[in-house]
Image (cartoon, helix red, strand yellow):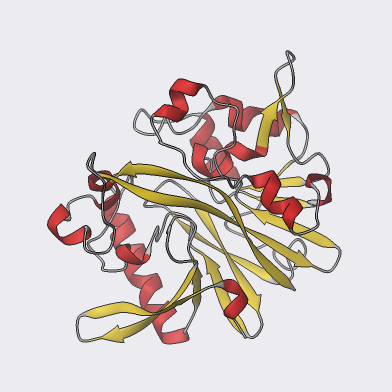
Amino acid sequence: MKLYPIETGNFKLDGGAMFGVVPKSIWQRTNPADSNNMCPWSMRCLLIEDGDRLMLVDTGMGDKQSEKFFSYYYLFGDNTLQKSIEALGFSLDDITDVILTHLHFDHCGGAIAHNGSNGYRPVFKNATYWSSERHWKWATEPNRRERASFLKENIMPIEESGQLKFINRTGNLTENAFPNIDFLFVDGHTDSQMLPMINYKGHKLVFMADLLPSVGHIPLPYVMGYDTRPLITLEEKGDFLATAATENYILFLEHDHANECCTLQHTEKGVRLKDTFSLKEIG
């Protein structure tokens, strides 16, 4: 198995929204904001090459939204999903599976593109797109809190293409569908967000999506204002981070602009950061 980080671009979000009730005087020590209180964030995806399968976890924001839409997120950098995949010597048509941790626009927008004047098309024509049935229902019948993050043009064309399949939350499909990957389901950020847990070089590597956006979010109270159920996030995060520190999991960070991977350790103050490093440094 080989793993590759896929940089799809960067954006900015309000630091207060990203750290919830934590005061700016504290969170800006790890995540400095600009004069508009905006912090930089990555949209870092993961490519998994395993035998004859090429699996992509999340797809970034894509480029099909309006100029007005993108103006809210201050996009910067030259990386795109396609450029990053092709730089590794692969093509979009080589992707066999797209695993979507959840269907917020910054995680699934790159899965669908404009199809001229005829609507939309899947970017990866040969891939199976994987979600969970429970989250799919949550996203296609959105609550008022999340409606602006679940965009129909990002979601419905996946189903209409016939390429959509579900990973069963109550029964694990990993033996048949993903021999070296398990999935952790969490409900605090959004219902049934699924985090791939990958067996890699003797390690357990976990794609963190929005359970842990950055190393600045490791202390338990540092929960995003975007989370729909922050108290559940607090419980899920506490349980997971304790296990990750004990078992020495490698955490792959989707949104941390400065850090690709990290490990954790137990301290007198609770679980804290141990090391940061890149994928290519994993032995």
Q: Nearer the viewer, residue 137 or 179?
A: 179
- How many marks can you see? 0
* Quarter-of-image position of residue 241: bottom left
Q: Is residue 235 above or below residue 149?
A: below
Camera-nearest residue between 107 and 275: 275
Residue 83 position, x and y percent, is 69, 47
Residue at (26% x, 66% y) in the render = 220
Residue 219 shows in the view? yes
Q: Is residue 118 above or below residue 214?
A: above
Residue at the location (40% across, 35% down)? 73
Left/right of residue 25 with respect to residue 221 in the rendered view: left
Q: Is residue 166 visible?
A: no
Residue at 76% over, 46% down: 128
Name the residue furthest top: 117
Residue at 70%, 18% (x, y): give it.
119
For the C terminus, give its image quadrant: bottom right
Quarter of the image that includes the N terminus: bottom right
Counting from the top left corner in percent of width and height, residue 234 is at: 29, 61
Residue 85 x/y as whole percent: 72, 52
- Residue 153: quadrant of the picture: top right
Left or right of 194 in this view: 273: left
Q: Is residue 101 above or below residue 146?
A: below
Picture quadrant of residue 11:
top left
